C-alpha cells in the first residue's frame, strides 16, 4: 500500500539509468541470512523479529541488504538522495521515480485521491460492501482473503469505472499474481504482468474508441489529463492504472484476511467494534491491527553513494529492502509489538510508509476496509476461527495470510 513494488528484480544500476554499479572496491560481505529460508516460509513475522534482534542490517543470499529496525527503515525511507526508488528497468509511475520527476507525477496522482474525491466516493464503496456482505452465507464458512479479493475487485472497478464483465478475470488475476509472487517464478510473474497490462489496454482502448461518448469516470479522466502540460503517454497511463489496481487488489485481499482473522481471534475487540465505534476510532483500529500483522513486507531501494547503516558499510549501487513488517514490530519503537495500542503506536506506525513515497491511497484503502468490516459485522452476530480448516501464512514477498478460513454466525 505504499507506492507499490515493481514486479521485476532488475535494479537500475547501470549507466543508462544514472545509477552506479556496486563498488568493486568494497570488501566482500558474506550472506547473513536466506530470505527464502525455511523459517521465513513458515512464519515470516517471527523470522523477521529474530533477524531484527540478531542482525538488524543483514546481507541476504541474493546479495541484497535488508534493514529490520524501525529507526533504520524510517531513516532510509526519508533519505531519497542516498536510497533511490529507481529500482526497476521498467517505467513505474510514480513509485520508481525520484526528485522532481516524482514530485510532478505524485502531484497528478494525489489529485485523484484527495479527501474531497474520497468523500464523494464513499457512498459507492459502502454500496459495494453492503451488496457483497448481503450475499454471504450466514451461518457458514468463508475465506477472508477470498472475500477481500472479491470486494477489492468490485470496489476498484466501481471507483475506476471498469466494466463488470472484467471482474471475474480480475479475481483470477489476483490469485495467479499471488501464486507467481510466492513461487518467485520469473517467467510466471512476467506472464502475469503481461496479462494485467492486456486488461488495462483493453479498457483504455475502449475509452479512446468511444471518444466524447466515453463514460465520465476516473479512467477517462486520466486518459484526458493534461495537468503535466501534455497528454500522458500510453506507457504512463498503463503504469498508473497498474499501480492503482494491480497492487491494490492484492493488498486489499491480504488486509481483509488479517483484519477479519484478528477480530475472530480477539472477541473483546470484535465486540467493541460491533458496539458502534466512530469512523475515526475504527480507522485507528485498522491501522494498529495492520501494524501488528502487516501484509506489506518490504519495499526496495538502491543506494546512490557510500553509506553506513547499523555500523555496516554499504557501497553505491547496492540493493536494499526496507522491511516494514519488522520495523512495525520493533520493541524500540512499540514496546511489546503484539500489544494492541492504537493511540500509543500511531505516531510510529509505518504500515503506509513514510516520506516522499508514503502511500497516496491511504485514505481510499482505509475507507474501503472500514466499509467492508462494517458490512460484514452488520450481517453477522459473530466471526469465529474455523478450527476445522488450516490457516496458511503468506510467504514473501507478501505477508498476512495466504488462506484465512473463518466461520460466520
Image (spheres, rainbow, N blue to C red):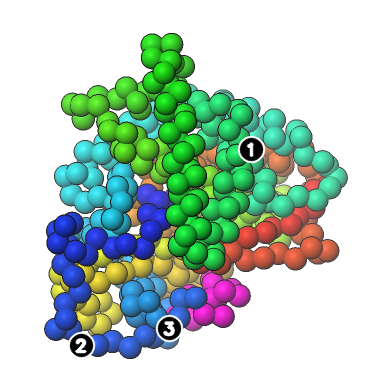
Q: Which residue is mark 1?
A: 168
Report if residue 264 is visible in the image: yes
Q: Position of residue 242 (x, y in %)?
A: 42, 42
- The residue at 45%/49% (across/down) is 193
- The residue at 67%/45% (across/down) is 147
Above or below: residue 363 compared with residue 390: above
| Residue 33 in which image quadrant | bottom left
Above or below: residue 62 compared with residue 127: below
| Residue 372 in which image quadrant | top right
Q: Residue furthest right?
A: 139
Q: Position of residue 34 (x, y in %)?
A: 45, 81
- C-alpha span from label 3 to label 2: 18 Å
Q: Please name whichever residue, 288 or 298, is drawn nearer the observer in this view of the structure.
A: 298
Q: Earlier in the sequence, mark 2 or mark 1?
A: 2
**Span shown in magenta:** 37-51
- The residue at 48%/57% (across/down) is 189
Circle 2/circle 1 CB separation < 8 Å: no
Q: Nearer the viewer, mark 1 or mark 3?
A: 1
Q: Which residue is mark 3?
A: 33
- The residue at 22%/77% (across/down) is 314
Q: Nearer the viewer, mark 2 or mark 1?
A: 1
Report if residue 372 is visible in the image: no
Above or below: residue 349 compared with residue 60: above
Q: Would residue 45 be counted in the magenta stretch? A: yes
Question: Crowdedness of circle 2 by 10 Å Cα count: few (<14), some, many (20+)?
Answer: few
Q: Which mark is residue 360?
A: none
Q: Position of residue 102 (x, y in %)?
A: 23, 45
Q: Is residue 319 left or right of residue 382?
A: left
Q: Is residue 151 left or right of residue 250?
A: right
Q: Which residue is mark 2?
A: 27
Instruction: Name the magenta segment's main secondary structure.
Output: helix
Amino acid at each position: 500500500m505504499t507506492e507499490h513494488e515493481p514486479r521485476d528484480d532488475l535494479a537500475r544500476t547501470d549507466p543508462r539509468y544514472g545509477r552506479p554499479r556496486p563498488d568493486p572496491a568494497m570488501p566482500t560481505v558474506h550472506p547473513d541470512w536466506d530470505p527464502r529460508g525455511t523459517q521465513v516460509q513458515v512464519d515470516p513475522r517471527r523470522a523477521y523479529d529474530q533477524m531484527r534482534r540478531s542482525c538488524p542490517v543483514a546481507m541476504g543470499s541474493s546479495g541484497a541488504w535488508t534493514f529490520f529496525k524501525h529507526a533504520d527503515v524510517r531513516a532510509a525511507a526519508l533519505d531519497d538522495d542516498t536510497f533511490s526508488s529507481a529500482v526497476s528497468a521498467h517505467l513505474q509511475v510514480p513509485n520508481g521515480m525520484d526528485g522532481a520527476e516524482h514530485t510532478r507525477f505524485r502531484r497528478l496522482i494525489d489529485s485523484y485521491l484527495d479527501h474531497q474525491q474520497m468523500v464523494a466516493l464513499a457512498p459507492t464503496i459502502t454500496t459495494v460492501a453492503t451488496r457483497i456482505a448481503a450475499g454471504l452465507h450466514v451461518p457458514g464458512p468463508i475465506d477472508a482473503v477470498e472475500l477481500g479479493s472479491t470486494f477489492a475487485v468490485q470496489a476498484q472497478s466501481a471507483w475506476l469505472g471498469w466494466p463488470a464483465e472484467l471482474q471475474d478475470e480480475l479475481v483470477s488475476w489476483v490469485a495467479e499474481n499471488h501464486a507467481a509472487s510466492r513461487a518467485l517464478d520469473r517467467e510466471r510473474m512476467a506472464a502475469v504482468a503481461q496479462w494485467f497490462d492486456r486488461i488495462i489496454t483493453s479498457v483504455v482502448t475502449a475509452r479512446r474508441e468511444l471518444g466524447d461518448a466515453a463514460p465520465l469516470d476516473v479512467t477517462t479522466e486520466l486518459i484526458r489529463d493534461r495537468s503535466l502540460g501534455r497528454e500522458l503517454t500510453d506507457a504512463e497511463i498503463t503504469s498508473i492504472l497498474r499501480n492503482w489496481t494491480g497492487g491494490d487488489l492484492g493488498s486489499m485481499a491480504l488486509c481483509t484476511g488479517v483484519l477479519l482473522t484478528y477480530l475472530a481471534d480477539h472477541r473483546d475487540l470484535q465486540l467493541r467494534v460491533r458496539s458502534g465505534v466512530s469512523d475515526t476510532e475504527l480507522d485507528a483500529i485498522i491501522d494498529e491491527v495492520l501494524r501488528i500483522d502487516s501484509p506489506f513486507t518490504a519495499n526496495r531501494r538502491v543506494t546512490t553513494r557510500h553509506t553506513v547503516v547499523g555500523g555496516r558499510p554499504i557501497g553505491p549501487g547496492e540493493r536494499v529492502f526496507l522491511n516494514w513488517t519488522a520495523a512495525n514490530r520493533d520493541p524500540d519503537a512499540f514496546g511489546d509489538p503484539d500489544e494492541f495500542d492504537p493511540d500509543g503506536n500511531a505516531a510510529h506506525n509505518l504500515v503506509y510508509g513514510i516520506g516522499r513515497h508514503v502511500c497516496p491511497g491511504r485514505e481510499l484503502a482505509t475507507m474501503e476496509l472500514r466499509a467492508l468490516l462494517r458490512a460484514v459485522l452488520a450481517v453477522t452476530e459473530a466471526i469465529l476461527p474455523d478450527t476445522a480448516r488450516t490457516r496458511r501464512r503468506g510467504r514473501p514477498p507478501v505477508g498476512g495470510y495466504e488462506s484465512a478460513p473463518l466461520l460466520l454466525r
